[in-house]
Image (spheres, rainbow, N blue to C red):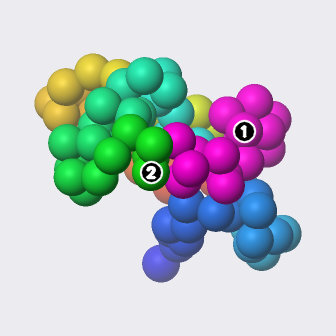
Amino acid sequence: SPYAILVSPLLIESGQYSMTQRILVIDVPQSLQIQRTLQRDGISEQQVQAILKAQSSREDRLNHADDVLVNDKDLAWLHGEVERLHHFYLTLR
């Protein structure tokens, strides 16, 4: 494979970022992140806040990022961005 993807919600906190050559952060405004988590997981807003508090700050994640994909639009847009990044990653060595 030309590249591999490591999906890790706690990449920074766990230190796994040291195993990578490049970091892509999927970013989203916090209000949208909370809304999506509430819809997806069926948990309380307090539980969502506790989860977010246990994670690195958005600023810290963005500071570690080589690439940022802001996921605040529809799926068609997201698929296009993923395709664009895929082609970009194929050019890296």
Q: Based on the displayed image, in which of its 4 quarters is residue 25 positioned?
A: top right
| Residue at the (79%, 39%) spot, across then down | 60
> In terms of secondary structure, where does tag 2 sit?
helix
Classify 92 as above or below 69. Answer: below
The structure residue drawn at horizontal position 47% and vertical position 78%, both measured from the top left corner, is: 1
- The residue drawn where x is 29% and y is 52% is 43
| Disc number for residue 70 | none
Seen from the viewer's position, the closer of residues 55 and 28 is 55
Give residue 27's position: percent from left, percent from top. 52, 33
What secondary structure predominates along the stretch shown in magenta? helix
Judge whether residue 34 can be spotted in this image.
Answer: yes
Instruction: Tell me residue 15's x, y (percent).
Output: 81, 70
Q: Is residue 27 left or right of residue 73?
A: right
Amino acid type of the residue tagged 2 in the rendering: Gln
In this picture, residue 54 sits left or right of residue 64: left
Report whether 45 appears left or right of 68: left
Toward the viewer: 9 or 47? 47
Where residue 22 sits, quadrant-wise, is bottom right
Residue density around tag 2, few if under 14, some if 14–19, many if 20 or more, within 10 Å: few
Q: Residues within 10 Å of mark 1 (few under 14, many from 20)?
A: few
User: For mark 1, what is the residue?
Assistant: 57
What is the number of the mark on residue 47? 2
Which residues make up the magenta segment?
Answer: 49-64
Q: Quadrant of residue 14?
A: bottom right
